[in-house]
Image (cartoon, helix red, strand yellow):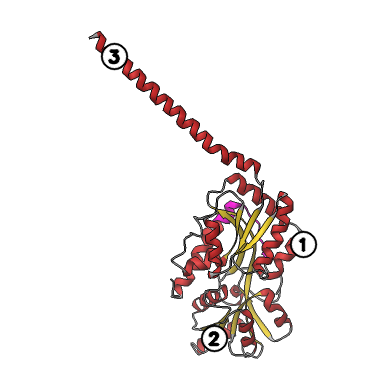
């Protein structure tokens, strides 16, 4: 009997030792697995970084990314390369970054186009605008301006809305193309103003603006920088800006809310995000350096060319902004009953 009990005791003791060794091994393995992340964050950066832009070289997004990248390179003492991956409303660039290694070396030049509009219009994207990325900071936010040819009888936004209400479908608005911010802003405006206006898509801003000046379309939702010379030249009348506050570029032009549609607000915004899973220490380092850069007068001037304002924030603030902005674009698409794919 004693022999049996001794045998059972020895068996349990060996089992306990085996479990203990496994537990120690598990803990040690976890520590070793975490070591590269900790070390990587401490050594960051030790090689060139990349900012991926979803539009061709020479455009507004590209120029802004290069301006920030140049200064970030100096701050981090590493090259920062801008890589252009245009196409599909800049969703190709977003998809590339979402699938990149989450080590902080690949960032997306994020904007309403790839994290707001594209996901609202396309059901087949292989990234989620919120879950697939780690926000770093916003850079700038710029409103659109509602304009029309100076030959229009309507002199104010209220008069323009009244004219559209009197003849549903008689007034049209141009955009740089279907699915652009100008297109969706027009849909949102028609819905909020309770008027029916016809969308006329063009291949780019130049053709749309030319037709508007010629009176072939009555309205256009434009970026401020491209339209300002025409407004100052008297060929185009600015009715309202789509931001919550008046723009420094057009201080005498009211907001849409001031002009008669309370609560109306829609803006183009730009920022930086990294792939989801990027270590918080690296995100914080990038945020700290970029926010410093956004205080440089030269950078402020470069980023403000689109008529916007600098919007540096924390990763947490940017995340909260996206949680509000992304559903807003989906609502615009849904309310306008736009076709998605």
- Label 1: state its secondary structure: helix
Q: Which residues are magenta?
A: 309-319
State the residue at coordinates (52%, 77%): 178
Q: Nearer the viewer, residue 314 or 81?
A: 81
Q: Give me the C-alpha separation between circle 2 and circle 1.
A: 39 Å
- Label 3: state its secondary structure: helix
Q: Position of residue 254 (x, y in %)?
A: 65, 75
Toward which corner of the image does residue 37 lie, by quadrant? top right
Q: Position of residue 157 (x, y in %)?
A: 60, 81
Residue topped by disc 1:
298
* Residue 155 visible, this angle: no
| Label 2 CA crowd tier, 10 Å (few <14, some 14–19, many 20+) | some
Q: Position of residue 151 (x, y in %)?
A: 65, 91
Residue topped by disc 3:
7
For discs 2 and 1, the disc positioned in front in the rendered view: 1
State the residue at coordinates (52%, 37%): 33
Indicate yes or no whether the magenta region holds residue 310: yes
Residue topped by disc 2:
172
Q: Is residue 155 above or below residue 327?
A: below
Left/right of residue 195 with respect to residue 86 in the rendered view: left
Q: Position of residue 182 (x, y in %)?
A: 57, 75
């Amino acid at each position: 009997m004693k022999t049996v009990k001794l045998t059972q005791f020895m068996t349990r003791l060996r089992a306990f030792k085996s479990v203990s060794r496994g537990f120690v091994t598990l803990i040690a393995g976890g520590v070793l697995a975490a070591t590269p992340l900790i070390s990587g964050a401490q050594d960051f950066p030790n090689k060139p970084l990349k900012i991926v832009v979803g539009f061709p070289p020479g455009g507004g997004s590209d120029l802004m990314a290069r301006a920030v990248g140049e200064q970030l390179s100096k701050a981090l003492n590493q090259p920062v390369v801008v890589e252009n991956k245009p196409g599909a409303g800049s969703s190709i660039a977003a998809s590339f970054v979402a699938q990149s290694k989450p080590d902080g070396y690949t960032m997306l030049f994020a904007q309403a186009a790839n994290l707001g509009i594209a996901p609202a219009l396309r059901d087949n994207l292989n990234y989620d605008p919120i879950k697939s990325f780690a926000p770093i900071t916003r850079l700038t936010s710029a409103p659109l301006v509602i304009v029309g040819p100076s030959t229009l009888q309507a002199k104010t936004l209220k008069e323009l809305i009244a004219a559209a209400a009197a003849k549903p479908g008689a007034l049209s608005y141009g955009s740089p193309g279907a699915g652009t911010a100008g297109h969706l802003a027009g849909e949102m405006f028609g819905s909020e103003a309770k008027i029916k206006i016809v969308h006329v898509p063009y291949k780019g801003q130049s053709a749309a603006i030319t037709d508007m000046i010629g009176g072939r379309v009555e309205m256009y939702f434009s970026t401020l920088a491209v339209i300002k010379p025409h407004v100052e030249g008297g060929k185009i009348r600015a009715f309202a800006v789509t931001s919550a506050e008046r723009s420094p570029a057009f201080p005498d032009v009211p907001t849409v809310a001031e002009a008669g549609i309370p609560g109306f607000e829609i803006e183009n915004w730009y920022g930086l995000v990294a792939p989801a899973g990027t270590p918080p220490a690296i995100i914080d380092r990038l945020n700290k350096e970029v926010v410093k850069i956004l205080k440089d007068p030269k950078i402020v001037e470069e980023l403000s060319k689109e008529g916007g304002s600098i919007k540096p924030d924390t990763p947490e603030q940017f995340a909260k902004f996206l949680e509000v902005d992304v559903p807003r674009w989906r609502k615009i698409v849904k309310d306008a009953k736009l076709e998605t794919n």
